[in-house]
Image (tube, grey):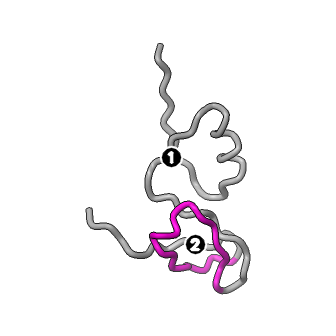
Amino acid sequence: MPERDTYLVTCPSCGTANRVPAASEGKSGRCGSCRQPLPALHTSPLALGDRTFADFAAAYRGPILAEFWAPW
């Protein structure tokens, strides 16, 4: 799959599609229309542990796809 230069992130407040540069991955921005915060762009998996997952899930306002693994 070719890499993209930009992604569309929909504002959760007003529904406006905002073009976000791929280089801004992991950073949150502001909607160009209503100036409300946009969720951070994540296009690749993040490795989170038992100490970091709850904080990430509580702060992230977009959908989260999680895969859990245990050694047993």
Residue at x-position 45% and y-position 58%: 43
Measured as percent of width and height from the top left, residue 4 is found at: 36, 71
**Which SS class for mark 2?**
strand
Measured as percent of width and height from the top left, residue 40 is found at: 60, 63
Tell me if mark 1 has few (under 14), some (14-19) or many (20+) residues whose alpha carbon lies within 10 angstroms of its own: few
Measured as percent of width and height from the top left, residue 61 is found at: 66, 58
Residue 10: mark: 2
Query: What's drawn in magenta, residue-wise?
Result: 14-32
Does label 1 or label 2 sit earlier along the sequence? 2
Q: Is residue 14 left or right of 3 when viewed as pictured?
A: right
Residue at x-position 67% and y-position 34%: 51
Residue at x-position 54% and y-position 71%: 9
Front residue of this view, candidates 4 and 65: 4
Residue 46: mark: 1
- Dividing the picture into quadrants, the one containing residue 17 is bottom right
Tell me if mark 2 has few (under 14), some (14-19) or many (20+) residues whose alpha carbon lies within 10 angstroms of its own: some
**Depth-wise, is mark 1 or mark 2 nearer the camera?**
1
**Is 51 drawn above or below residue 43 in the view shown?**
above
